[in-house]
Image (tube, grey):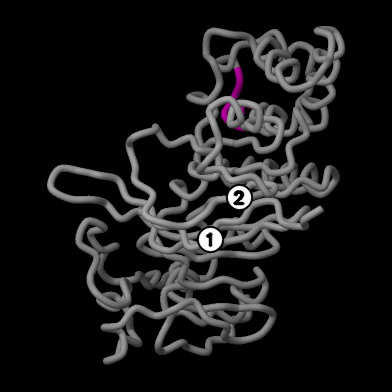
Amino acid sequence: MSDTVLSIEDLHLSFPVFRGEVHALNRVSLEIKRGEIVGVVGESGSGKSVTAMLAMRLLPEGSYHIHGGQVNLLGEDVLAASEKQLRQWRGAKVAMIFQEPMTALNPTRRIGKQMVEVIRQHQPLSRGAAQLKAIALLEEMQIPDAREVMERYPFELSGGMRQRVMIALAFSCEPELIIADEPTTALDVTVQLQVLRLLRHKARASGTSVLFISHDMAVVSQLCDRLYVMYAGSVIESGTTQTLIHHPVHPYSIGLLKCAPENGQPREMLPAIPGTVPNLTRLPPGCAFRERCFAAGTKCSQTPELTPDGAEGQRVACWYPQREDRHV
C-alpha cells in the first residue's frame, strides 16, 4: 500500500473570464503522507483554497480549465473520476472542514439529524448506532451536554461550538484525509487555540492526514509537520515546519514571518510586504514576486524552478535565496 494519501503534480488550472483567463494555479505540486498534517500558507489570492477544493472536485464543473497535471487521492485519479465515484469518496475517503460552519451546516435541520445522516450514508450502521457514534464524537470534541446539542439547530450554537461540530462531522466516517480550509479564521484567539488542539489530537489519535489551509504562519506553526508556501498560484517554498519557521529562504516567506503580529516589538510599526499580488489574468514574465521583492535581480526575468535548498528537504523557487535564522 502506498504511503501517499494525496499527490498533486504539476497542476495548471485557470478560470475563464471576460476577455481572458485567471491563471489560479501554475504548476502546483504537493504531497501528503499517511498521518501527516501539512499546511499550505499564503496571502489571499495565492491559490490555497482552489488547490483544496480541486482535491475533492468541489469546484463547479465547467467553471475551470485544467491545462495539465494530475491529482491522485489514495492512488485514484481525481480528475478522471465519475460523479458517482466522487460521492462515494467524499466523507468516506476525504472530508472537508469549511471556514464558516454556519454556511456549511444546514440551518433548518438539527445537529443530530445531520450527523446521523452523514454517518449512515457511508457506514452500515443502524440509526441508533449512528446516533451513539455521533454523541461520542461530540464528546471527543469536548462539547458539554452532547445529547442536548444533538437536538439543537446550528444557529443555537456559538461559533466555536459549530466548528467543533464540523470537526466531529469530518471525522465521523473515518476518512484517510481531512482538508481544513481556514477553519479558525472567524474565531477569537482563545477558542482558536482550543479548536486547533482538538483537531491535532483527533488527527494524531486516528492516524488521519490533514491538509490545513491558512494565511497565518503562527497558526500553521502550532499544528503542521510540513509547510508549502504559495504565491500567485505557485508553490514558492516547502519544507518542514520548524525549518521554514526558523530558517526561511524565499524573500516572500521571510516577509510573511516579519509581518506577523507575534513577531513584532511593542510600540513599533509592523513591517509589511510592499505592493499587492499580481493580476493573475496577466502574470508578469519570470518570477511573479519580483516587483515586491527586496532581493530581486537580473535573473528574476526568468521563471525559477522549485529546487532543493537548505536542510531537511527544504525547496525554494528563487534565483536569490536568502539565509535568515529566526529565533522565535
Q: Name the residue under label 2.
A: 72
> Label 1, on which residue?
9
Q: State the image coordinates of residue 246 (x, y, percent, origin top left).
A: 62, 78
**With 101 as the anchor, is 130 left or right in this view?**
right
- Specify the amino acid type for callout 1: Glu
Q: Residue at image x 33%, y 84%?
A: 294
Residue 44 visible in the displayed image: no
**In the displayed structure image, the side of residue 237 where residue 22 appears, left or right:** left
For the residue carrying disc 1, how many other residues have a C-alpha within 10 Å: few (<14), some (14-19), or many (20+)?
some
The disc placed on residue 118 is: none
Instruction: Residue at 63% x, 60% y: name it.
Output: 31
Identify the magenta region. 157-162
Badge 1 element:
strand
Quarter of the image for residue 255 reads: bottom left
Majority SS type along the magenta span: helix
CB-based contact (under 8 Å), mark 1 and mark 2? yes
Would you place residue 132 above or below residue 173 in this image? above
Mark 2 secondary-structure assignment: strand
Would you identify the image quadrant in which residue 43 lies?
bottom left
Q: Which of marks 1 and 2 is nearer the N terminus?
A: 1
In reply to whether residue 109 is colored magenta, the answer given is no
Q: Position of residue 160 (x, y in %)?
A: 62, 32
Residue 193 placement (x, y as % from top left) = 66, 47
Could one spot residue 287 in this view of the protein?
yes
Q: What residue type is labelled 2?
A: Asn
Q: Looking at the image, how many numbered discs can be counted on the residues?
A: 2
Q: Which residue is drawn at 42% across and 64% down?
A: 234
